[in-house]
């Protein structure tokens, strides 16, 4: 019997990616994915050993797409500090645009899902190391003060991640469409302009 077309494999992975933000890994079933992809449930057996194998491939695909976006924003002709700022901006945009997915995966980690935990352990350090290297480059060019990177990375990461994730927490858990910040609606504080301003303010704090 000939192996089914790779289009089916792609359709299943794409369907899973669309469903994952809503259901998380714990709530995602192969039947849901097959229905979304308009594929017979039995087709999973041709491409994936089991649900965990499918989840691992899907999560890795998501991360590789994300990591590629970060790498594409680094250019030799830019200063190290500009590269750092631009990478953080892309990171902030990605977290904002995928905050429902990030929130679902955080819940899966807290619930002890081994597949998601392995995925985080395998990949999370990669973009942190990228940011760490950019900080070191900026230090060499005397664009950032020579303090320990552990003092720099947490606030920079927080500037890109905390507000989008909080927005999703308030939306899902409390039903709020507006964060408890006077005069600031979610669409405003999650805008590109606001993301850039938060990053710039923090980076300025580490200037000489």
Image: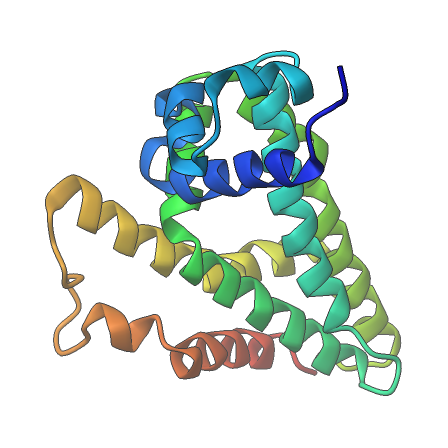
Reply above or below: 184 against 102.
below
Q: Is residue 203 left or right of residue 174?
A: right
> Residue at horizontal 56%, vertical 54%?
154
Q: Quadrant of residue 172?
A: top left
**Left or right: 191 as drawn, with respect to 1:** left
Residue 148's quadrant in the figure?
Answer: bottom right
* Residue 148 makes an appearance in the image: no
Quarter location, residue 61: top right
In this picture, is 141 found above or below 155? below
- The quarter of the image holding the C terminus is bottom right
Residue 63 visible? The answer is yes
Tell me which residue sits at (42%, 61%) in the image: 96
Residue 206, percent across and down? Answer: 63, 74
Q: 83 or 142: which is nearer to us?
A: 83
Residue at 45% across / 82% down in the picture? 197
Residue 111: image location, x then y, percent = 39, 19
Using the image, determine if residue 145 lies above or below residue 168: below
Quarter that holds the N terminus: top right
| Residue 207, placed above or below residue 62 | below
Name the foreground residue: 59 vs 118: 59
**In-image side of 141 versus 49 (left or right):** right
What residue do we see at 56% from left, 26% from top?
Answer: 55
- Frontmost residue, 108 versus 130: 108
Q: Is residue 183 left or right of residue 162?
A: left
């Amino acid at each position: 019997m000939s192996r089914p077309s790779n289009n089916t494999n792609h359709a299943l992975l794409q369907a899973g990616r669309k469903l994952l933000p809503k259901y998380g890994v714990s709530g995602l079933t192969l039947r849901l994915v097959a229905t979304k992809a308009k594929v017979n449930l039995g087709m999973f057996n041709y491409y994936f050993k089991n649900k965990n194998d499918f989840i691992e491939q899907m999560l890795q695909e998501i991360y590789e797409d994300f990591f590629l976006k970060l790498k594409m924003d680094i250019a030799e002709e830019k200063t190290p500090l500009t590269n750092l700022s631009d990478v953080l901006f892309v990171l902030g945009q990605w977290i904002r645009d995928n905050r429902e997915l990030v929130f679902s995966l955080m819940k899966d980690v807290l619930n002890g899902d081994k597949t998601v935990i392995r995925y985080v352990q395998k990949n999370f350090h990669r973009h942190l190391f990228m940011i760490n290297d950019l900080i070191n480059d900026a230090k060499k060019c005397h664009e950032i003060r020579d303090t320990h990177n552990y003092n720099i990375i947490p606030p920079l990461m927080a500037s890109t991640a905390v507000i989008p994730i909080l927005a999703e927490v308030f939306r899902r858990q409390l039903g709020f469409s507006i964060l408890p910040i006077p005069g600031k609606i979610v669409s405003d504080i999650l805008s590109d302009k606001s993301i850039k301003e938060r990053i710039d303010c923090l980076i300025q704090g580490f200037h000489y």
